[in-house]
Amino acid sequence: MLEADPEFSGLDFSLLTPDWCSKAGFYAPTEAALKERARWVRRWLREREEREIVVVAHGDILRYITNGKHSGMPWANTEVREYTFLTDGEDADAVMVPFVAESIVVEGDNEPTSSSPMAGKAHWTY
């Protein structure tokens, strides 16, 4: 369990449900589940009182969180982007928009994600 690993001491795991790593239901890798989970994340983030929040995730779910779909938009490894919400709470989907036009920091190449047919193959070319 993550809680027992000293590397993660001090982190709050209370929001994790017992099935968080099950790949079923809410956590399934299906289009519908990914869209709903990303929507839930956006709404949860928008409702937080903090104004600056760091989200660390895999590129596949980041596409759904930031674009509402698997857009194919490349994310480089360890890339930093800044987003804000289109509204303060009026839209049920909690639409996100880039705060700045470009990435803030990029360390690494654009790599195919685990759901890409190119996963494990050569780098994507754009």
Image (cartoon, rainbow, N blue to C red):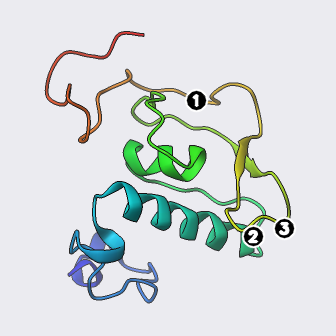
Mark 1 or mark 3, earlier in chain: 3
Residue underneath mark 1: 105
Front residue of 94/83: it is: 94
Please state if 8 lies on the left or on the right of 36 as rendered.
Answer: left
Disc 2 element: loop
| Crowd class of label 3 (few under 14; some 14 to 19; many from 20; radius 10 Å) | few
Mark before the other along the chain sequence, 1 or 2: 2
Kindly report which numbered mark, 3 or 2, lies closer to the viewer in this rendering.
3
For label 3, the residue is 90
Q: Which residue is mark 2?
A: 50
User: Between residues 104 and 97, which one lies in front from this camera angle?
Assistant: 97
Is 48 left or right of 75, judged from the image as shown? right
Q: Residue at x 19, y 15 (%)?
A: 122
Residue 55, given in percent of the width and then of the height, sits at 54, 56
User: Could you tell me if the residues under marks 1 and 2 are in contact, i.e. CB atoms within 8 Å?
Assistant: no
Report x, y in % for residue 112: 29, 29
Measuring 31% from the left and 26% from the top, which residue is drawn there?
111
Spatial CA distance of label 1 from label 3 is 31 Å
Q: Quadrant of the N terminus?
A: bottom left
- Determine which quarter of the picture holds residue 100: top right
Identify which amino acid the numbered label 2 is placed on: Glu
Q: CA distance from mark 1 to mark 2?
A: 22 Å
The residue lying furthest to the left in this view is 120
